[in-house]
Amino acid sequence: MDSGLSDPLPPHVVFYPFPIQSHVNTTMSLAELLCLAGFRITFVISEHGHSRLAQYTDTLRRLSASYREEFVFKVVPDGLDPDAPRSDDNLWKIYDNYQKDAGSLFRELNGASPVTCIIADGLMTFSIDVAEELGIPLIVFRLIGPQCFWTYFNVPQMIETGDLPIKGEEDMEAFIRCSDLPSFCRVADPLDPFLQYIIAETLQTKRAQALVFNTFDQLDRTVLEHVRKHFPNVYTVGPLHKHLKLRLAQVSGAQSQVQFNSFWQVDRSCIAWLNKQPPRSVIYVSFGSLTRMTREQLMGFWHGLVNSGQRFLWVIRPDLVAGHEQGSEPIELRKATEERGYMVGWAPQEEVLEHSAVGAFLTHSGWNSTLESLVAGVPMLCWPYYADQQLNSRVVSEAWKAGLDMKDICDREVMQKMVNDLMVDRKEEFLSSTGKISKAAKDAVTEGGSSWESLDCLIEDIKAMRA
Ligand code: UDX
């Protein structure tokens, strides 16, 4: 007999990531985890991102087959021409366009199906104004590590005490040196627009209901204690790429193969190449989705890698290097690359890092690459490019002892030495540290682990937001 009481509607959560590769991919892992918990998801994505996913992955088909109408995309324009690069100054244009359209977008979504909660990218806290106006709770998802968030949070104080703008490298003995500050903080003028933007976005976060990080407590315990004093509702649910795989496996009862949600054509031929290499013999080289370098820097890396004598797998994104014509490199580099190197335009990075042939990772220290390397237990050689990366590379080398920090140097001799330190001379020392971190990361996302429990809390807290 019908009791007359029906289950309440599942929560409806709108995800609102900044539409670049790394933010969309990681946010989608969190969205899928909430969908697995029975939530209805609307995932806002740019036309450009949506068409890239359709072109290069089976993400759209896979999600609609798994969750049907419970996971839907809301496709929006980003204000750029289809072929314009989604990097550098164009990112500001996207930001402005998203900001302009946020009010009408959320009104439309809430009108179609009342929204329980918005989970917005920490780069776009303008959405808090709209959420407040509509009476919808909003949670901020920061896609940087807590150390960087904490540094940004303290920038106003650093300006007040005169520590910023930096005057030089005079505090080289300190744990965090001037050169380790996020690049936006290394400016001459405290009114620099980037710096002001970062300060504003970070302080606005205090108006949100909660804050989510893609990290796990054991990795960032001390800094999280500081953050939690100012932000009482912090959820640490990472590493999300691993977390999603384990939860999917629990549901399906099998090892889950999540396909990467890529904006680029993935070249899987590198896996066949890796299969032929000895264990831990290859250094994987990749600088993420936004880094640009000069031809001179490319040559520095290339000579350093070749002179190290180690095997290497290198991701050269089509837009990575300005002013280099393929084939114009010195013949000895080409020959050495044919003998013990392999190059692709875009790799299945998570799979590459988990491959037994990979022994080290030359990285730009983006937060996702850092976490993926830690989970796989692969030591890093860090060449930070910008934003949070200067700080991440310092933490990798000094706090976690998980690699070496080249900082701003791109010198072939330094590189050659560091590659060999990492892969030969100090190999056991680094593998021992990364092995421990890898285990802690996996424990955190296993049932009963800190990130597993934090996600369960987030799920329950969003359920409680239903009016
Ligand atoms: C940006 C910022 O630059 C970074 O500083 C911030 O921490 C996150 O957002 P990005 O530069 O792309 O990201 O770096 P990262 O965070 O490391 O993300 C790159 C992603 O692309 C990783 O998930 C990685 O697995 C993936 N990737 C990269 C591939 O799948 N294949 C590749 O060949 C290269």
Image (tube, rainbow, N blue to C red):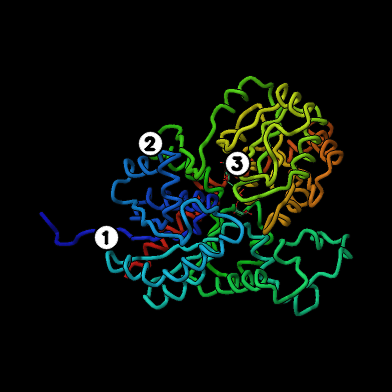
Percent position of residue 44, x then y? 41, 58
Quarter where residue 269 is shown: top right
Percent position of residue 248, x then y? 42, 40
Name the residue beneath numbered marker 3.
318
What is the secondary structure assignment of the residue under circle 1?
loop
Task: Give, as a three-letter code, the residue at label 2.
Answer: Ser
Task: Give, as a three-letter code, the residue at label 3.
Answer: Pro
Relative to the observer, which residue lies in front, 210 or 1? 210
Would you call the spot at circle 3 few (<14 residues within 10 Å), some (14-19), or many (20 or more)?
Answer: few
Percent position of residue 363, x then y? 69, 44
Mark found first going from the N terminus, 2 or 3: 2
- Contact, mark 2 vs mark 1 (Cβ under 8 Å): no
Name the residue beneath numbered marker 1.
9
Residue at horizontal 49 percent and vertical 50 percent from the top: 83
What is the secondary structure assignment of the residue under circle 3?
loop
Q: Is residue 428 visible?
A: no
Would you call the spot at circle 2 few (<14 residues within 10 Å), some (14-19), or many (20 or more)?
Answer: few
Percent position of residue 299, x then y? 77, 39
Task: Give, as a three-letter code, the residue at label 1.
Answer: Leu
Residue 252's label in the rendered image is 2
